[in-house]
Image: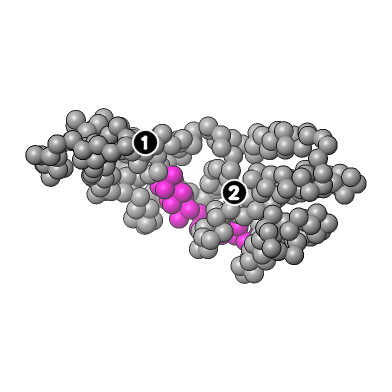
Amino acid sequence: MEIEPIIEEWDTRIKQLLFFSTPETLSYGNVVVAIRRIRSLALFLQYNEPILREWMMTYLAENRKEIFARWWTEHINRWVLTHTDRYCHRKILHPNVKTEWNSVFGNTDICFEQAEQVALDMEQKRPFKCCDDPVILKMHEAKEHAYDDWEGCWYCEEQEHAWQTCLEKRLKQTSHPLLNADWQSILQRPELDSITEWEPPHKWDYEYLSSYHDLITYKQYIIKQRTLLYINSGETMYQAMKKFIPAIFHYGGWLLHNNYKKTPYDRFIQLWKTLDLVLFSIRMDIPTLVDLEMD
């Protein structure tokens, strides 16, 4: 089943709709054209959602083991790397991460706890006072502190950055796939044969929340955001539409995020994050569109 023409058409319709806020385009500020395009997009999505869903579920059924290996490996590895980053807050791990990974690899050399311990050890070594690399330690020798318009020393900052890079390199040189992000290395492991009905977790795009949520909770969150946006009165149609279009693309299922990524796995992840919100978003937002038409 070929879905690229559908996704390309979807992307084209989004770009056309964004012309509403693009000066020097024929539809700039044209509320009537914007309403027509949103309605057309809604019909397009309603028609094609089942087609995209069928492709998504077929891809999952045919590639379940690979998706499991890649989704969890990349997810956990991003969390691991934050243990060496001086400025990045630690990533949020899905609450089922340990249970799901260890249900397959818990009694092996690549269990979650081994990767976790290495990450925690790296975090303890993150302060520069723990640096044990002689090349990095010599970077500041015989050099006076040099300051710019900020309070830090150039050479100290250079050393700090080099030490962080060194720790990241050490992580990637380990054999554990959760540390080196080599998900392909585990595809032939027999433990993956136990995966038969698994589905990847959902991390909804643009939710900006501190933790993971089920679909019902996330829908309630979207409704709350819409209420905050649409409660204003006394706006012109142009003002209301200028706020409405970014809002529907910020939360919900009108837009396929990260559309520049086009591998089959990328397409699967994009659809997995979006399709459950498509029809919900249409039902939620079209009444607001009707109100705009009546003003």
Q: Magenta segment range?
A: 54-75
Question: Could you tell me if residue 124 is visible in this image?
Answer: yes
Closer mark to the observer between disc 1 and disc 2: 1
User: Which type of secondary structure does the marked residue at label 2 adopt?
Assistant: helix
Q: Is the residue marked by circle 1 packed among few (<14), some (14-19), or many (20+) residues within 10 Å?
A: few
Residue 138 location (% of width, % of height): 11, 41
- Residue drawn at x 83%, y 37% is 234
Residue 287 occupies which quadrant of the picture? Answer: top right
Disc with the residue nearer the chain's start (1 vs 2): 1
User: Which type of secondary structure does the marked residue at label 1 adopt?
Assistant: loop
Please tell me whether residue 119 belongs to the stretch shown in magenta: no
- What residue is disc 2 on? 273
- Residue drawn at x 41%, y 34% is 89
Image disc number at residue 87: 1
Q: In this view of the protein, which residue sits in the foreground, 169 or 108?
A: 169
Residue 252 location (% of width, % of height): 67, 45
- Mark 1–mark 2 contact, CB under 8 Å? no
244 on left or right of 2 = right
Image position of 184 with respect to 106: above or below = below
Residue 278 location (% of width, % of height): 70, 50
41 on left or right of 182 = right
251 on left or right of 68 = right
Residue type pointed to by label 2: Lys
Q: In this view of the protein, which residue sits in the foreground, 114 or 222?
A: 222
- Residue drawn at x 66%, y 64% is 12
Quadrant (top left/top right/bottom left/bottom right) for the C terminus:
top right
Residue 236 location (% of width, % of height): 82, 44
For the image shown, how many numbered marks are present on the structure?
2
Q: In this view of the protein, which residue sits in the foreground, 174 or 18?
A: 18
Residue 91 occupies which quadrant of the picture? Answer: top left
**Which secondary structure class fits the magenta region best?**
helix
Residue type pointed to by label 1: Tyr
